[in-house]
Amino acid sequence: MKQVRRPRALSSLQVQLQSRLCSYCEPPSTSTSNTSAVATAIPSFSPLPKPNADHRDIGLQQELFTTSIYSPGSPILLPNGARIFNRLVDFLRKQYVHYGFQEVITPTIYKKSLWAKSGHLENYAEDMYTVTSTSPVRADSNQENSGEDEYGLKPMNCPGHCLVFASQKRSYRELPIRYADFSPLHRNEISGALSGLTRVRRFHQDDGHIFCRPSQIEDEIRKTLDFIRVAYSVFRLGPYRLALSTRPLEHYIGSLQDWEQAESSLTRALDACGQSWTLNEGDGAFYGPKIDVILKDSDGKEHQTATIQLDFQLPKRFELEYQAPAPEAEQRGETTTDADALGVFGSVRPVLIHRAVLGSVERLMALLIEHYNGKWPFWLNARQAIILTVNDKPPVVEWARRAQQVLLGLPCDGDSSSGGPVAPSQLAIDFDDRAMALGAKIREAKKKGYGMIVVVGEVDAANRTVTVDATGVPPVEGEEPVGKGMKMTPEELLDFMRSKQPKMDLTAPSEQPPDYIAAARAHGINLRQSAPIRRGPMALELPILTYLKAPERRVILASASPRRKALLSQLGLSSIEIFPSTKAEDIDKATHTPEEYVSATARQKCLHVYETALEEQEEAAKAKGDNDAAVPQDPALVIAADTVIATRAGKILEKPRNEADHVRILKHLRDTRVHRVLTSVCVLAPKADASHPGYEIAAHTEETKVFFAQANDGLPDDVIENYVRTREGADKAGGYAVQGIGGMLLVERVEGSVDNVIGLPVRKCLQLCEKVVFKQGEEEFAESDDGGED
């Protein structure tokens, strides 16, 4: 689909409106929705400002960026602008860890033959910059005017990411593979349309491409929609609506079956996201349907920002493939239990999902500049704080400098750590010790937009404090406005500043969504064009859980404990395989501390089950011969745990041997009042490469303190004796179940993780699973004496 050329320079209003449109792999859509704005699942933040907030004026005032006649359309970010840019990129990089993206760095120029192969040269030839060498001796070809010497600056990253995917042989076990890229892009926009940060020729995009199996499309779309929800909530951008654009009536590529499958996947993902959406029939890209995020400003105008697009064509053009069993069913996105079909491996074409959560980072900066009207939230502000001295006397200046060093996270003079590596706070803390009136300094600082003004006088220097005015920090919804005249130590102020970092809601949408139908009617929406809302409860969507729930992955719990299985089942791992260790627990309790004992036992269980599973698999493969017996899969993950109770004297309690022993144990726990429950979790996953020892293993020991009620406070001997007769705790170390009657009658309170007392600290278990699966090769978790991580 060829991009429409503008025959003449646009008016400033047209530039402002069109520049907000997401410029991705396809030209901005010219069609509009036949409905008005729809209520969304995100909070209703304050709308975007009216057009009188111009990012170009504010950018000049706050010294964010400038331009040059020597590079039109390529804004130069000044130090303040670079700070904001880097914080936006850093914010996205942190989310990439959560959503499973791997960042790559790709070339800025490619030979034009690449763009011809991808099909983009035909659609973007007029918008691309041609690059050639002026030196014949540096040419790639000996022939004059050879096409081998023609290069183009890249206008998008997707062909380069296809090259990355194609650089290795791929297995279905690896997918989805998610690449992210912040490489600069260049598009030869018409000079008359260039405007500030909104319409430029060089920009950086939060570009992402997901190569997935056909059966994974729906999950990946849902995760991307959740990514958008989180990001827009943090930036307080909204409300927005979602629009599904379907197959064009003409000029589309691919089979009708491909389109029906893609549109069905997008529809199901939209239904599950908890937000209303509208339909734009026939407005999809030529290679696949798409979801657009439509943001509404205070004037009622709508701007397309984020986009999610399905692409079946680039994988075909680049001949991308992965190996999978039952390839025909796999290509259709279906699963099969047919042993004959599963015994055949073949090539399958992956599906490519293009996604941009924010679009151009420069354009987003312009949008945020106008959205905040120059009054930045503290975490994004390029001028977060300035330290002002009341006078220039040495004691005042010296203490002010020391306060600045603390806030910057730098070693102060006399610190033993000076001269070594530092861990800077990444805060922007300026300093003003000029010999001028304090009032003039404060007025100047407020005019420049500093979030916090820190004043140091003689009393502050003597008391080792600072005086803080934080009225320049816009209050976050739900928080009380911050005042001025606050006395703090520099360390307290540093903690206060760190508390102003963005708070992200990484949970799934509410199990009880708001009444979207009533909200839609209030906005005049024709309900027949809105998809039905999928009600909860819904599955917990975390990358590690999605990975482990895949049917082809064998996840083993090296424990026969029904309580541990129940905890994992609550997370959605209901098909986990129970494979208890049969190795004798022969570690000497007398020569090991409780922490050492429980850690060594869990590790021993984990390794024994993993080795046993591999041995059984090898024996099954040998015994299969010509028969059709199924061979077990390689274990994708082994989870082992061991729980002990340690008394105040450091003794490890066993399970009760008989009723009298059971009564004695519970009376001892009551009379000593507090004891520790230690659970060590050990997880193991095979390595992606062949490096020794062939697996990645990580462990953590969690400690919880349990306080028993006292004899004179509702726990006399007869209550203990009657509880023992219930036999609830007969099979548990310590003789009680915190999740049952024992938690109501015996336990006064718990300090720490309750699920640790049940037998498995779930949150730590998931962290360990992420480590051995997604972060292989990084430094092992270390266990400290108190069970925490170093």
Image (spheres, rainbow, N blue to C red):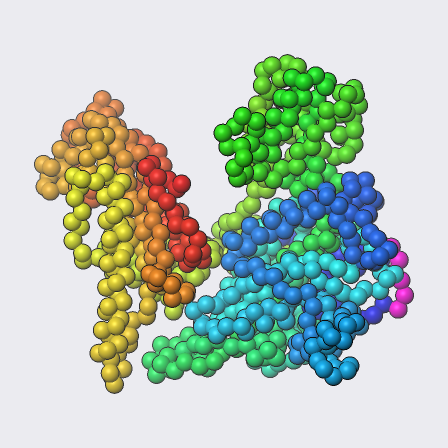
Q: Position of residue 589 (x, y in %)?
A: 17, 41
Could you say which is closer to the camera, residue 711 or residue 575?
575
Could you say which is closer to the camera, residue 575 or residue 752?
752
Q: Is residue 146 above or below residue 364?
A: below
Side of 379 relative to 508 (left or right): right
Tell me what residue is drawn at x 73 percent, y 38 percent: 375
Q: Position of residue 733 (x, y in %)?
A: 20, 42
- The answer to whether one can see residue 243 in this image is no
Instruction: Give the residue at the far front of this rendering.
Output: 137
**Which stretch did the figure color magenta?**
7-12
Residue 265 shown in magenta: no
Q: Position of residue 337 (x, y in %)?
A: 36, 77
Q: Position of residue 718 (x, y in %)?
A: 15, 30
Tell me what residue is drawn at x 33 percent, y 61 percent: 693
Tell me what residue is drawn at x 63 percent, y 29 percent: 404
Side of 162 relative to 36 (left or right): left
Kindly report the secondary structure that dominates the magenta region of the rendered protein.
Answer: loop
The quarter holding residue 293 reads bottom right
Q: Is residue 429 above or below residue 22?
A: above
Side of 49 relative to 339 (left or right): right
Could you say which is closer to the camera, residue 656 or residue 362?
362
Instruction: Give the residue at the far bottom of this rendering.
Output: 626
Residue 10 shown in magenta: yes
Q: Quadrant of the N terminus?
A: bottom right
Q: Is residue 222 above or below residue 381?
A: below
Q: Quadrant of the C terminus?
A: top left
Tell me what residue is drawn at x 88 percent, y 61 percent: 192
